[in-house]
């Protein structure tokens, strides 16, 4: 391996270490505790060195949120591929979305601004709309006989998202408010009810 490749690999390792340290702080103390100084202490770098990788805290938050969107898209894509029938794909994708929100609670809060400030650069992330595009494609497949317009597809996607994201937000802000069995019933009722409406 040449010196350029070694330097590039070291830079990528350093970048990953910074992001992992940031998530460690957030999981232990919350988003309000995150600072470049604390990250530097954990990875035993100087704060100025961190600024060589991320120009400011907003750039760091953007990188974390972008990672979250990629993880979410992969989980939803994997869920979709386990089913052949579009209505089953749709339910599986939304259930994967739900699972991600609680497995990666801190990332979800950052990505969608639940109980925290969401990232100002959210719309510029390469992966921020991948999950919505996947869902919209399945909705279009279910509604193909009706030949829905782009506006209708958008409306149907946001009907799903507003209900599911709303339920997730209620649970993230008020932990344990509804209980696991109630949540699962509400979630499945919502997904199945909206899916039926696509065929009417």
Image: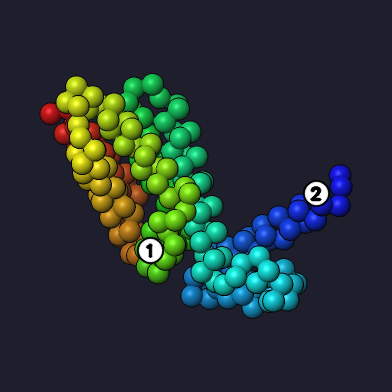
Position above or below: 138 against 190: above
- Residue 106 is situated, as x and y percent measured from the top left of the image, at 48, 61
Q: Mark 1 points at which residue?
A: 113
The answer to whether marks 1 and 2 mark residues whose Cβ atoms lie closer than 8 Å is: no
- Residue 118 is situated, as x and y percent measured from the top left of the image, at 41, 65
The foreground one among 51 and 183 is 51
Position above or below: 145 against 58: above
Q: Residue at x 63, y 60 (%)?
A: 20
- Rounded to the nearest angstrom, the CA distance separating label 1 from label 2 is 37 Å
In the picture as drawn, the residue positioned furthest to the right comes out as 2
Q: Residue 199: which quarter of the image?
A: top left
> Mark 2: which secondary structure?
helix
Q: In which quarter of the image is the C terminus?
A: top left
Which numbered disc flags the more N-terminal residue, 1 or 2? Answer: 2
Looking at the rendered structure, the number of numbered marks drawn on it comes to 2
The foreground one among 81 and 101 is 81
Q: Residue 197: which quarter of the image?
A: top left
In this picture, residue 153 sits left or right of residue 77: left
In this picture, residue 49 sits left or right of residue 139: right
The foreground one among 138 and 41 is 138
Q: State whether residue 46 appears in this view.
A: yes
| Number of other residues with Cα within 10 Å of mark 1, as a class: few under 14, some 14 to 19, many 20 or more | some
Q: Mark 2 points at which residue?
A: 5
- Residue 99 is situated, as x and y percent measured from the top left of the image, at 43, 46
Q: Residue at x 33, y 59 (%)?
A: 169
Q: State whether residue 102 appears in this view.
A: no
């Amino acid at each position: 391996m040449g010196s350029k490749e070694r330097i590039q690999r070291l830079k990528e390792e350093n970048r990953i270490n910074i992001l992992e340290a940031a998530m460690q702080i957030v999981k232990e103390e919350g988003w309000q505790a995150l600072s470049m100084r604390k990250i530097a202490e954990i990875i035993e770098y100087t704060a100025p060195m961190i600024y060589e990788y991320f120009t400011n805290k907003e750039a760091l938050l953007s990188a974390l949120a972008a990672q979250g969107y990629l993880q979410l898209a992969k989980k939803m894509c994997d869920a979709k591929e386990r089913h052949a029938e579009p209505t089953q794909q749709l339910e599986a994708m939304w259930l994967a979305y739900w699972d991600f929100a609680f497995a990666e609670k801190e990332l979800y809060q950052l990505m969608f601004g639940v109980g925290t400030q969401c990232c100002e650069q959210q719309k510029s992330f390469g992966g921020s709309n991948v999950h919505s595009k996947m869902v919209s494609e399945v909705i279009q497949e279910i509604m193909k006989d009706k030949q829905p317009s782009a506006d209708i597809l958008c409306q149907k996607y946001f009907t799903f998202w507003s209900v599911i994201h709303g339920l997730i937000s209620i649970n993230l802000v008020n932990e344990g408010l509804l209980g696991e069995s109630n949540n699962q019933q509400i979630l499945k009722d919502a997904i199945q009810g909206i899916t039926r409406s696509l065929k009417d």
